Amino acid sequence: MSVTLILLPIALAVAAAASGVGVLGAAVTAKGKDGDESRPAIRVRTRMKDSTLLADALGNLGASAIDVAGSRVTAEVDGITLTMTLTDDTVWEAHVEGRDVTVVSATELLQQLDTEYAALVQQAVAEKIRARAKGSGFELVSETREADDTVTMVLNVRAEA
């Protein structure tokens, strides 16, 4: 079986959630692509934008055969083929295919991928803050990481800034 998922940018997902699509941002539509009811289309909110971080997140999930080619990312995850394509209107569309793929398993895979991606974005942002703090007139006083991997940084404005 195969499942196609359309990954909405966070801003669109918030609007969709407000209109009743759901807190988790996932909703099964009545028909899949080309009206094929056996291939449901699912809309899932996402914060994914960077294909390099996306490939790294797939690697963290244990994916193999990861291929990034412009606006297309493909990978094998636990016997499942995942193909993600960035559409012209910058919305990721994910197609999940495998023998035992269901709407639930495809959605769970994309949620796991989103979680991994978010952690990588957080790491990249924290690194940029560390690198730019001094040159921007700040001093990094402390940095802590919580059990849920949330990073808290305390910055002071330097007196000479």
Image: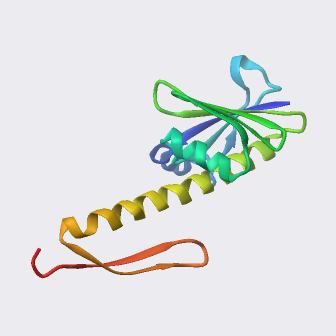
**Quadrant in the picture for the N terminus:** top right
**Quadrant in the picture for the C terminus:** bottom left
Q: Position of residue 117 (x, y in %)?
A: 57, 52
Q: Position of residue 29 (x, y in %)?
A: 70, 34
Going by the picture, which residue comes out furthest to the right? 99
Q: Quadrant of residue 143?
A: bottom left
Instruction: Residue at 44%, 57% (x, y): give it.
Output: 124
Instruction: Residue at 49%, 48% (x, y): give it.
Output: 10
Residue 28 or residue 115, whichever sits in front: 115
Side of 7 where 5 appears, left or right? right
How is the structure coloured here?
rainbow
Asked whether residue 60 appears in the rendered view, the answer is: yes
Going by the picture, which residue comes out furthest to the left? 160
Residue 2 or residue 155, whichever sits in front: 155
Instruction: Residue at 9%, 78% (x, y): give it.
Output: 160
Asked whether residue 23 appears in the rendered view, the answer is: no
Q: Position of residue 81 (x, y in %)?
A: 77, 33
Q: With respect to residue 53, does 123 lie above or below?
A: below
